[in-house]
Amino acid sequence: MNPPTRTHVEKGETTRQSGESKTNLEKIIVVQGSNKFEIVPEKGKLLDAALNQGKDINYKCQKGTCGQCTVQVLQGLKLSKPNEQEHKKLGPEVNNGYRLACQAVIL
């Protein structure tokens, strides 16, 4: 009997055969300056997930005051709503997908 096979499909979707469930991990895609990063969702702050995965996102204070970690989220809506610190630092840009990676929490 052959072992079950896996087929990898774009957008992080893995389909398993032999009656196993289908798992879809939607990557979070962010842009910072001219750099584009794909981040696999993991619980915690967006910045921590990016750094854990070796992404070279700029940051400094990690308190939401300096703005160095500002990113624009292109894909991945499973983030916390912008908090008071993000609204204060980014103003109306939060409505255009801009977030502070040190404040945005992956849900």
Image: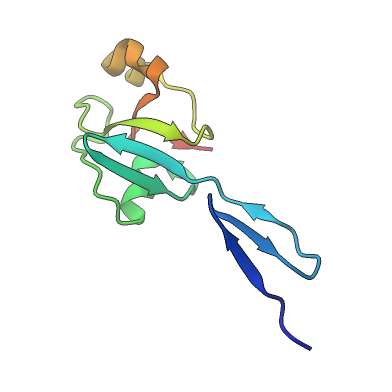
Closer to us: 26 or 70: 26
Closer to us: 25 or 105: 25
- Quadrant in which the N terminus is drawn: bottom right
Quarter occupied by residue 53: bottom left
Closer to us: 56 or 81: 56
Residue 87 in view in this figure: yes
Which residue is at 74% across, 59% downward? Answer: 21
Above or below, 10 against 93 in this view is: below
Which residue is at 34% across, 45% downward? Answer: 37
Above or below, 95 against 27 in this view is: above
Which residue is at 74% across, 68% downward? Answer: 17
Q: Is residue 99 left or right of residue 35?
A: right
Residue 104 in view in this figure: no
Quarter occupied by residue 59: top left
Which residue is at 29% across, 51% downward? Answer: 55
Across and down, in percent, residue 22 comes to 70, 56
Across and down, in percent, residue 77 comes to 52, 32
Q: Is residue 4 left or right of residue 31?
A: right
Across and down, in percent, residue 81 comes to 48, 23
Quarter occupied by residue 78: top right
- Quadrant in which the C terminus is drawn: top right
Closer to us: 22 or 99: 22
Above or below, 70 against 27 in this view is: above
Q: Residue at the top extreme?
A: 92
